[in-house]
Amino acid sequence: MAIGMLSVEDQVAIEGYLKEFLAKSEAQWTAVVDKGGNLFAEMGEIGSLDISILSALAAGSFAATRELAKRLGEQEFTALYHEGSHISILMTALEFDCLLITVFGEKTNIGLVRFYAQQATPGLDSALSNASETEAQMGPLEIEADLAPDSGGIIR
Amino acid sequence: MAFINYSKREIQLKIVYYGCALSGKTTNLINLHGGITSTQKGDLVSLATDADRTLFFDFLSLNTQTLPGFDTRFQLYTVPGQPVYNTTRQLVLKGVDGIVFVVDSQWERMEENVESFANLQENLIENHLSLAQIPYVLQYNKRDMENVAPLHYLEFTFNNRANRVLSFEGCANKGDGVLDTLNGVARLLLAKYSKSAAPVRALTGGNKPS
Amino acid sequence: MTASIPGGTARPPGSQPLFERARKRVTQRLSLAGLNSGGVGSAKFKIPAAEAAPAPAAAPAAAPAAPAAPAAPVPEQVEAVLALPASVVIPLLPETVLLADPASLLNSPQGQMDFRLPLGTVLPMLPSGKIEFSIGDLSQCAPDGIIHSVESLGEWAAQNVLLPLPQVVMRIPPEFMTLRRDQKPIDTAVAAMDDPFSPEALRAKAEAAQAAQAELEQASVEAAISSTPSPAVEELPAAATAEIETPEPVPIVEEVQPDVQPEEVPSPASAVVEEAYEPVPAYRPVAEPSIPEETPVIPEPDFSFTQSAEYQSLLSKLQMAEEPVAAAEPKPEPEPDQPVSIPEAREVSPEPEPPAPRPLHTFSFPSPPKPQVAETLPERPPEAPLPASPLSAAVDAAPAISGSFHKALQGLTHRESAEETPLVHHSELHDLMRLPAEVPAGFKEFTRQLSLWPGMKCCVICGPDGLPIASAGSEGKSGDSLAALAPRLFKNASNLLADLGRTDLFEMNFPGEADSLTLFRNRHFILITVHVDEQLPTIYRQNIREALNLLAQSGPG
């Protein structure tokens, strides 16, 4: 079941795990996104890359291999690793239809990143579980104020 | 599904442009990307073949601050229209909040339009959704072509369900109707969060009810 | 703004006369409620065959009945018919089902007549986007003399023909294509809402964002110059903060730039702010040097003693001919921080007076013995045979160890001389591992054999990327973590040792209480061994290094 809301406390908790993971793995950037491409939290430096695009492509990349996994008898791959000449990316499946995306360079190696990603997974899963419980207790978002007025609305 | 980040005060909504092959889904996004100022949009990502046929999806992120106190990020996706990519369409529909169904108004594409609409309903069911739950609008595209069906026939064919939906004429390659269509579906999604009589719970988001 | 679809008809110019006879004869309103109950694409509305069959006959029968309509109720058997010209249908039919060739039929009077399609059959097909009739049904709708009778069509009767959709639709009055009565209308609140993406609103927002960004940059530059650096975001007006979508501003004070001269500092007022989206401050103030906590502050050595006479005499005694050290210039003092000539700059503490030169130490120590330099190099003693492994007795006593390993260890420990003909590498590895010739001497076999050596608990071999290649032993489950961390261990140790001028690190040993680790590295692989003793025997270590090199040369398998 996907998570539809993220409170401040839950995001801070997720960011805490990401910060620790980033420091240990010496990766460049890491984020938790859901498989629909929504960005939950991120940590690190990604330069001028559009994070929303990165999240959408990573989620799409994960989804694209689901059929391949099924053909191989797997429900879904738990991790995907794309290696580049200088920059690589590791995507690890989490609970609640989420992914841990990690971008790293030559400063570290896949073994280390994968190792600490596996270590960070239980903590992130528990943080996502808390977020899911928080969402269940919170009501729907309702904004009392009027929507922002349009200044013209002329059809192009 | 909609994602609300109370920490960033951001709402993320996913809109999928659906329709048969070459109906103008990607053209809609290209036109939107070109027409909206840079502060409100990201890059347009297009995973396509060399022949400009969508292979996986197109993606465009647009921001607006219509909801007071929240930054609303619309993530626009298109699906590949060719029948062979049905699995991909199912994947892209995952977590959808709103749909724009693009109809190719030409007579010879009518059967494909209808099949695509039926396919949309099937794929929504695969994702445990239905058209009754997901807001959608219709865009009758390519109105500038010569051999196009009349609007009353298109309405009779596509807009004759239990709930009438917003429909728009369009010429996506010229930009006609593109922004109106987007505004239409955006209004449907934003209306969910605008309740003038409801208590303002959004401003205290993140606090668990005592 | 809602672009509504007009409810009226928009007939294209030049269209065929629509359906006039059928309109006069229609007295029964067809119920369209069943057409869309299942949504677009359903065709559940079907006229029973008993009604459909006499449709062509009912049409002419309805004509004489029509004059009586004003006086009496219209009979319910009348069915609406759509007239489709034969010239449209004939080219779509296979010649086999036609009574004559298509060209002659089109030129005949029959070619000018119409196919009479029951509207009740056509209308349910409209939502499917195609009009499809079987040839058998078409034969019943066709004028005489065009298609064979149904009885003589045989298998052709069930074949379907797609009729041109525009030709059919344009002959149906728009009032037959009305929307369902029970359809819920569009929510007027939604329809009346303002557009989130109007061009004017977007343009206004873009301009506001640019102005806010420029203010942000201006404020950040001013904040950087102030005595108490504070995050620039705190000085922003609340409205600008709400509008800006940029991420949190990067702290201004980041790094030391000692080469910034005071006269080169531009005035803050003239700082150039470039694009609003990606501003680049023209000036970054000199910040306090940030000394990492881990790096100790090494005091400058004092070489003034080299000027002393005692030192010179010592050099001569050691027969180390050295140029008399000229009056060397004293080592320059480290440059003090350049004071920043910016108004309200932070106060720079005055430079302390350089310390007075220390008095020269007078020291005396016994003369070192003169090294005995041999005239000729002594003969190299013959290489001593490899000592027997201290564990060989345990090997002999352990019956559970496989014979191949036993022989392998015997071979290792009882190598007689260095003059043995070196074997081909691949074969040598086989001999080393005592493996059958047909079994590839690969990583798995290597690690398996190693794990069987007395004192070994487990071993893992991995690549420099930290991914395990093979592992064996009692702690195989932790092999992944050992492999992941091993490259980092070597890298960190190598970095530290590089400061000591040692660059070649190929083995590390970590004694522990429960067990110990020894890591081996060559250019291609890293081997991690977990063993009971604090250190591996020398023979183990030598052979492991040799085996690793062999593996690197021969490759896996």
Image (cartoon, rainbow, N blue to C red):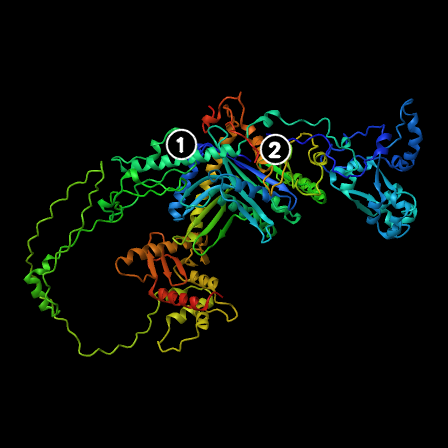
The chain ID associated with circle 2 is B
What residue did someone put label 1 on?
C241
Q: What amino acid type should be assigned to the residue bearing mark 1?
A: Thr
Left or right, residue C75 beside residue C362: right
Q: Position of residue A138 (x, y in %)?
A: 50, 28
Discs 1, 2 touching: Cβ within 8 Å: no
Q: Position of residue C22 (x, y in %)?
A: 85, 33
Q: Position of residue C335 (x, y in %)?
A: 18, 49
Taking depth in this image into account, of A148 and C408 the one nearest to the observer is A148
Which quarter of the figure has residue C180? top right
Left or right, residue A83 beside residue B83: left
Taking depth in this image into account, of C185 and A30 the one nearest to the observer is C185
Mark 1 nearby-residue class (10 Å; few <14, some 14–19, many ≥20) = some
Figure check: C305 above or below B130:
below
What residue did someone put label 2 on?
B135
Number of numbered markers: 2
Q: Residue at x 61, y 51 (%)?
A: A71
Q: Residue at x 41, y 61 (%)?
A: C525
Q: What amino acid type should be assigned to the residue bearing mark 2?
A: Pro
For label 1, the SS is helix
Measure the alpha-carbon separation of dots 1 and 2.
33 Å
Taking depth in this image into account, of C260 and C356 the one nearest to the observer is C260
Q: Residue furthest front?
A: C14
Which quarter of the figure has residue A9? top left
Say if residue A27 shows up in the picture: yes
Q: Residue at x 27, y 40 (%)?
A: C267
Badge number at residue C383: none
Q: Are marks 1 and 2 on the same chain?
A: no
Which quarter of the figure has residue C142? top right
The chain ID associated with circle 1 is C
